[in-house]
Amino acid sequence: MDDLTEMLKGTLEGCVLEIIDSEETYGYAITRRLNELGFADVVEGTVYTILLRLEKNGLVQVTKRPSGVGPPRKFYALNGKGRQELATFWMKWEYITSRIDKLKEGGR
Amino acid sequence: MDDLTEMLKGTLEGCVLEIIDSEETYGYAITRRLNELGFADVVEGTVYTILLRLEKNGLVQVTKRPSGVGPPRKFYALNGKGRQELATFWMKWEYITSRIDKLKEGGR
DNA sequence: CTTGGTACTTTGTAGTACCGAGTACCACTA
DNA sequence: TAGTGGTACTCGGTACTACAAAGTACCAAG
């Protein structure tokens, strides 16, 4: 698939929130998960900037744990504010997709 | 609806392409059309920057026509390259929505 | 002749994904 | 024991996009 970066703006953060919500996990693994989901070109640097943003905005709780196979991992879990943010993300996503589908149908 | 601007990045240009494809039209009318479609907060400045970009990238043919009710209008129509761009936009859109739906379903 | 709706332009800003380079931990191996 | 490769995070800078803001200009109606 072509370059999707512009279309991912605004949605990628929501995807990361969803992944964290489904399981407490860390940056490197999130990147792999996104890649295997089909977002093949998403690179680590991108995910880490998102995670730092989430932390800065107080949406996640962070726990550092040793790894055994490499440097320590920073595990992320959603807090209340984070779950709220995730909910509004899905609301917006629903809204936008419905409008665009309407537009696509030549919608009046 | 909340602020959608970040999530519209990359998709709004596609919407404008679709609108132009369905009917030769001009900036002011495109803005109104987007508003009535549910993109209520999209303002003229945004649409005009998109239109200038389309023109710069050689995706549209522009025709200036007097209006009768105001200053002359710049009518936009897709050319071949523009129609191609629209097609790839819908491909990308399809791709992204399918991946995100999968993610939402907790998809493995 | 002022107001309001129509219509386009231009300059600047903020936010986001990405790039690139760097640091560092660990296991395996020649 | 030096080297390689996979794991894991950080940081500075860039490109692109939607948006804000201010301005110009055409026209009709009061």
Image: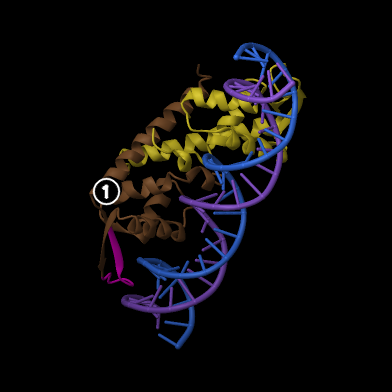
Chain colours: A yellow, B brown, C blue, D purple
Residue B15 at least partly seen: yes
Q: Nearer the viewer, residue B99 or B43?
A: B99
Q: Nearest the camera: A103 or B93?
A: B93
Q: If the image is split into quadrants, where does the C terminus of chain A sit?
A: top left
Q: Position of residue A101 (x, y in %)?
A: 37, 36
Percent across and percent down for residue A3 are 42, 39
What is the chain letter for disc 1? B
**C12 or B36: which is nearer to us?**
C12
Answer left or right for B81 relative to C30. Answer: left
Residue C6: x %, y % from top left: 36, 66
Q: Is residue B74 magenta?
A: yes
Q: Amino acid at mark 1?
A: Lys
The answer to whether residue B43 is above or below residue B21 is: below
Q: Residue at 53% across / 37% down in the picture? A: A11
Q: Quadrant of residue B95?
A: top left
Q: Which residues are magenta?
A: B66-76
Q: Mark 1: which secondary structure?
A: helix
Indicate the quadrant where residue A91 lies: top right
Is residue A106 at all visible to an observer of this figure?
no
The residue indicated by pointer 1 is: B81
**Relative vertical location of residue B63 with respect to residue B88 in this rendering, above or below:** below
Residue at image point 47% right, 23% down: B102
Majority SS type along the magenta span: loop
For this orientation, the residue located farthest to the left is B80
